[in-house]
Image (cartoon, rainbow, N blue to C red):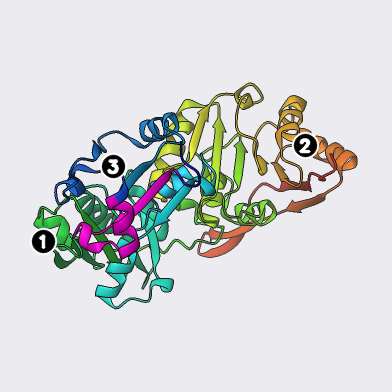
Amino acid sequence: MVDGPWLTLLGVGDNGLDSLTPTARNLFDAAKTIIAPERVLANIECGEKEVIPWTFGVQPTIKFLLERRGQPVTILATGDPMQFGIGATMMRHIEPSEMRVIPTPSAFSLAAARLGWALQEVASISLHGRSVHGLSAHLSPGRRIIALTSTGRTIGESARILVERGYGASMMTVLEHMGGAEERISQMAAREVLADKKEYAAFNTLAVECVADAEAEILAPVPGLPDAAFEHDGQLTKQEVRAITLAHLRPYPGALLWDIGAGNGSVAIEWMRGASSAHAIAIESDGERAARIAANALALGTPTLEIIEGKAPTALAGLARPDAVFIGGGISDPLVFDEAWSALKPGGRLVANSITLEGEARLLHLHSVHGGELIRMQVSRAEPVGRFSGWKPLMPVTLWSVRKRASI
């Protein structure tokens, strides 16, 4: 056992030990046990140290480290371990006082320096160990994106998404082995990357400068995506109502939403697009609709949306407590509201919509008991009437919005 930090994380570059600061080099020299990816170990002489190649996943790594808690262990991680790295993960399991972190310039910093991009104006994302479809949420004309990748295959997969979304002219820069002897930088438009089928090194970083084609559908991060952006069967919270619903739900970073009776997932998806690292669970009893939710989540850049195929309130059992709840279906069942309200964190918001008289009566009763706001919305859209145009009304929607008092 040691006093003070027992876990040391040293950020290294592609040039191995030469990338370490004097302080980090002294820590490496004093280390008895080293854990590192095999590609990092290939360029490092570890002498008599115990060396454990990092060939296992994140969860086994955490389990292994916690079993050795208190015993000195040093991990070599590429770049900044606190930026989409093992350091940020371990901070969720041990106290900061147990860990010492010495970063080296991250792939984001190195890429921005080589491209001449102001890093604070760039979307810095990770596609490493994550679905490449997460890229879709960041596409807009003129936007610059720097992304960590999993393998060389990520480049082609990203190019396909760009082309399919109407961003085929976007310039893709692939930066391989930055800082190392094999550093290489190549640039091509997304549609050229897709046609070229060039192979890239597994250790690479992707930079994208978004250029939208003239026909590209621009999907803003603010609530109210066009209805046509979603695959649906008509069971969809319409664009105008959805924008108002999200305004009452008030997404914020890291918050969890329960979307009960999710239909085709539009509210849950827009919740996640509306704030960084926001999470959502979509609960839907219809299997075909649940499948559409999954397809919509991939297409619109929220692949981590959790989908529960089941009927509320039974399907709510055991779920993480939400910061907000949207009831788009099932408000007429008293047990649905009771379970959701009980699980909702103090200070959290609940929003429920209804288009039926029975549902509206239920909302009026809940409003009389819990307070909050009641809104009745009537939207009409212009449509052809012979040679002319006229207003076609959508069904009126009653919305109830309430905040759970912290004292409850």
Residue 71: x %, y % from top left: 41, 36
Q: Is residue 136 above or below residue 330?
A: below
Question: At label 2, which amino acid type do we have?
Answer: Leu
Residue 95 sits in which quadrant? top right
Q: Nearer the observer, disc 3 or disc 2? A: 3
Tag 3 residue: 34
Query: Going 63% across and 24% down the picture, which residue do you hit?
Result: 317
Does 407 sit left or right of 198 as displayed?
Answer: right
Q: Is residue 252 above or below residue 31?
A: below
Q: Nearer the observer, disc 1 or disc 2? A: 1
Question: At label 1, which amino acid type do we have?
Answer: Glu
Give the alpha-carbon distance from disc 1 to disc 2, as whole Å: 68 Å
Give the alpha-carbon distance from disc 3 to disc 2, as whole Å: 66 Å
Element at label 1? loop
Tag 1 residue: 182
Tag 2 residue: 357
The residue segment tinted magenta is 6-29
Q: Is residue 361 above or below residue 270?
A: above
Residue 367: x %, y % from top left: 85, 42
Task: Check disc 2: other Cα within 10 Å, few if <14, some if 14-19, many if 20+.
Answer: few
Determine whether label 1 and label 2 are within 8 Å by CB: no
Question: At label 3, which amino acid type do we have?
Answer: Ile
